[in-house]
Image (cartoon, coloured by chain):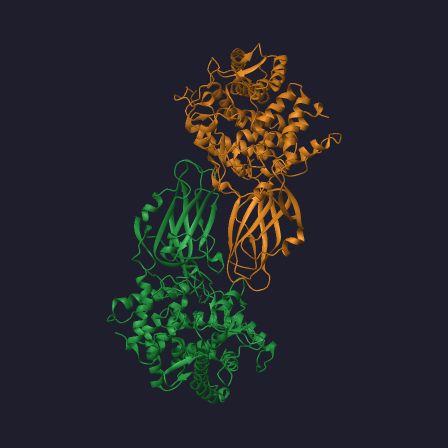
Chain colours: A orange, B green
Amino acid sequence: MVEITRRNLLSTVPHGAVAMALAPVALSAQPTSSLRTAGQSFLEKAEQLKPRLKEFVQAPLGLVSPVKDAAQPLGWRIEEAGDADAIASRLLKKKGDTLIIDFGGHRAGHLSFDIENIGDAIGAPVRLRFTFGEVIPDIAEPFYPYKGWLSESWLPEEVVTIDLVPSSVRLPRRYAFRFVKIELLGLPVGRKIALRNVRAHALTSATGTVPALPKRLPADLLEMDRVAAATLRDCMQTVFEDGPRRDQRLWTGDLRLQALTSYVTFPNNDLVKRCLYLLAAFPREDGLLPANVFEYPRPAQAPEFMMDYSALFSVTLADYVAATGDTAFGLELWDAALRQVRLVGEMIGDNAEIKFPKGILAFVDWNPQLDRNAALHAISIFALKQVMALAEKLGRAADVRDLPDKIARAEATALKAFWSPELKLFTSGSKRQISMASQAWMTLAGVGTRKMRSDALLNALRHPDVVQPRTPYLTHYVTEALFVAGHGLEALKIMRAYWGGMLKAGADTFWEAFAPDNPRVAPYNDFHVNSFCHAWSCTPSYLLRKYARQIG
Amino acid sequence: MVEITRRNLLSTVPHGAVAMALAPVALSAQPTSSLRTAGQSFLEKAEQLKPRLKEFVQAPLGLVSPVKDAAQPLGWRIEEAGDADAIASRLLKKKGDTLIIDFGGHRAGHLSFDIENIGDAIGAPVRLRFTFGEVIPDIAEPFYPYKGWLSESWLPEEVVTIDLVPSSVRLPRRYAFRFVKIELLGLPVGRKIALRNVRAHALTSATGTVPALPKRLPADLLEMDRVAAATLRDCMQTVFEDGPRRDQRLWTGDLRLQALTSYVTFPNNDLVKRCLYLLAAFPREDGLLPANVFEYPRPAQAPEFMMDYSALFSVTLADYVAATGDTAFGLELWDAALRQVRLVGEMIGDNAEIKFPKGILAFVDWNPQLDRNAALHAISIFALKQVMALAEKLGRAADVRDLPDKIARAEATALKAFWSPELKLFTSGSKRQISMASQAWMTLAGVGTRKMRSDALLNALRHPDVVQPRTPYLTHYVTEALFVAGHGLEALKIMRAYWGGMLKAGADTFWEAFAPDNPRVAPYNDFHVNSFCHAWSCTPSYLLRKYARQIG
């Protein structure tokens, strides 16, 4: 997910789908004070589960230089410009002298180096600009003038003034990078500096080795798996972050996909627990949980509350108990999980219209054309069903006796409101919009018959005006729906076009935003503020394992 | 002094005066190994004398804004824009929002503050540019494009990216400032930050209170004394620095003036000792001491060796023993002091021509028109006489038996080569240049009769083509020479025009460079890289005490 500003939401979410209702709907009451007490306890448990990050010190491969190349999806290729030993011998002498260092793969972490004078002592500070590149355009193109509407402060650069030469320097912040561009901004005339022992200090809370996929799989899928797992690894910090380059926040929607992928790659159940505790620690007065939390400077409720993400909190807990069998933890968060689906259910009227209480938003995907009504309805049903299954496992069936009836009525409403018997697919909104989002979520929610869902997916895929996903996040759910519906070939086709397209564009980790027909899609109006290691893009490693039987 | 680059010296020192001779002259031998052993011991003693800096935490006065004002010497005045409480209420919201904070006086030290969000959490880093102003133009005028030939890295600015809000921040480096301009470079749309508890952490190794001057002195001189003492205070760090904004180095020429001033204001004899040990620790092979040393990252010989500064090392030791009576220390450095004047004496030929050994330079003043020959000759005589006096105090008369004869010969040569009986002043060089430098140093060296020196000073002062000083450093020696010659009124006139001129231009501390007819003199071709708290400008506090009888 991204930082959500008022402008961002107003400009990208169509009014019809997620306009805020002025009057909050009535919500079942629960004493605020008991929520607060539970929240404090969850927070303490979350802090106890805070992982110590592992640091991997890595030497660079060498120097590179970017070359314009219209044949490349991002417009650039790199050429080698020297091996690792060449870095220290490429002296920086005058303003503008530049080194571009290639670490050969993506890292989230720190940068250290030794700076030395060659010849006369420097006798002045050395000012350097560091630019951290996840992809080649980061280090090949100027960042300014910046045209995006996310904070300019996310541009991955750092101007550092070093008073002491020689000295060992470790830059103050954490960065996300494969490439590091180092530009000399100020040095006395005639003086020369060399940088030695440039090192990345990669940080992660991922451990162990990803279980290998069957050897029979084609090379492109094995590569896709490797890059997907690297994406997850670099997003696994003291929480599951959405992306180490930007935002660096724990979002429920991203968390669900990361947790699912982690169970089959870098299992860290404590990190999933920590994240669920953190989200559960910050309910609104009515018990609704935020779409994300701030971890630093201290864990805190973020301002965004989102209908679909609240529902997915409950699903993430159900996934966790299913993956780990840890029913004790399931019971701890049971009340919160049940509460989310009830609160979300209350946001849907009998006529399938979404009635957003004040301050509640929804996401589904970044596509501003998307009508979210059908998808949100389906997500609510999906979550209700997952919570039913969880209740079973936790022995809390008594708490959900009313849910089967609620689900049945919601399904009936959904079919009535969204199913088009003529088109054989789900539409959404007054203009009967056809989107992959609607078909995917109706399929995952199990609305209608197996045949209806299968038809819906294929018909939408072939429809010339279908509204396509704009994010790996929704692309994941579309792909998973195709697998669930038994359309493995179609699912693989999407994976190859989407994640495979990023591989062809040179991805070392998978990106926040990509479109096969527009590799430089810029959801925030400036490509350089995109995140190129983004958690919601990590699911190929999950999909390739979960639906292995339909693949290869 | 300033950082000396090859370009700097070649472009500002006239060839005739200081061209490097290709062949080194023969120098008396001393085993290198014993110099090294002594150097190591001096270095250890210097480190034992390293002072703990005192930190004074200071709150700002409030906010100011600069206003163009052609009537002001530097072209600006400031207007109050809010009291100290206003700082936290002046929120930063969008790129370019700026606070200019006034601490009401000059400090050398750190800056700290608390950063808080007002309203919604920030959810992104905050990027700020800090510009540290010693004078109004620093915070009123853009630094770029930079036109100077000193390293651009000296421009006093820092771009800082703060990941955590709220948090307490202490900027990483030491700065020299009265004003701090804080500009917002990046913040998410709609977010707001406030800066609270902005504090200067002023550092100095000066202690105590400056003894008051007689109350009868006019207010302008009392103010000149206050500002001069503040200049010294902010240059007193773990060495006597030349200036806290730039260079931050220990130079012999600056040290002498700082030490003289410190004895009568902020006495710190250990700091003088430490500085003399540091300089004595790094002799060349022949025993010549460098014009300056680097203190950090570890004490080291700097590349500049300068004839006049080597001579002034011995003078500074003589001053120290005269001021403190510490003959034990005088004896420790006696060999080094005697060696400097002998080596410098050997650089002057019988015909008064300077023969610079390879790699030896000279300073005297920054004026590129200045012919330094006469002044350097006089400085050598001055130093020889000071060393004679020191030998007396130390009981080492036997070591200097040859010096009276050398001095007599040097004086005779000086009169023959430089004295103009027609003009009644000292000239220098083949073009018989008339400069204040020549008269001042000949006076201080006691060359010729009292009458000759008095005439020389007054005649030069009145001469329409006299080459004037370009630095407070040489202006000090001119002023002191006038006092020594009994021309107190003329000396005071210079002090009022020069240091008084800086006061009228708004100086909180005295500057590296100033000319009454050109307050924005830019010796490095860009006014913004000037230092406005510069040690060699601190001597009014010494002069007003030492020559009190001639004043007021």
Point out residue A86 in the picture as x, y percentages from the top left corner.
Answer: 66, 53
Residue found at the far left of this picture: B216
Is A502 drawn above or below residue A448 in the view shown? below
Point out residue B221 in the picture as x, y percentages from the top left corner.
Answer: 28, 68
Q: Residue at x 75, y 32 (%)?
A: A215
Is B157 on the left-hand or right-hand side of A468?
A: left
Point out residue B548 in the picture as x, y percentages from the top left corner.
Answer: 29, 75
Is A444 drawn above or below residue B413 in the view shown? above
Of residues A428 and A360, the one drawn nearer to the viewer in this rendering: A428
- Which quarter of the rendering shows the C terminus of chain A? top right
Is B491 on the left-hand or right-hand side of A338?
A: left
Is A263 drawn above or below residue B195 in the view shown? above
Quadrant of res B21: bottom right
Residue found at the far front of this picture: B431
Of residues A81 and B217, the one drawn nearer to the viewer in this rendering: A81
Count of marks, rendered view = 0
Residue found at the far right of this picture: A216
Residue B548 visible in the shown view: no
Point out residue A476 in the picture as x, y percentages from the top left corner.
Answer: 60, 26
Residue A170 visible in the shown view: yes
Of residues A124 and A93, the one drawn nearer to the viewer in this rendering: A93
Q: Residue at x 63, y 40 (%)?
A: A69
Is B450 on the left-hand or right-hand side of A239?
A: left
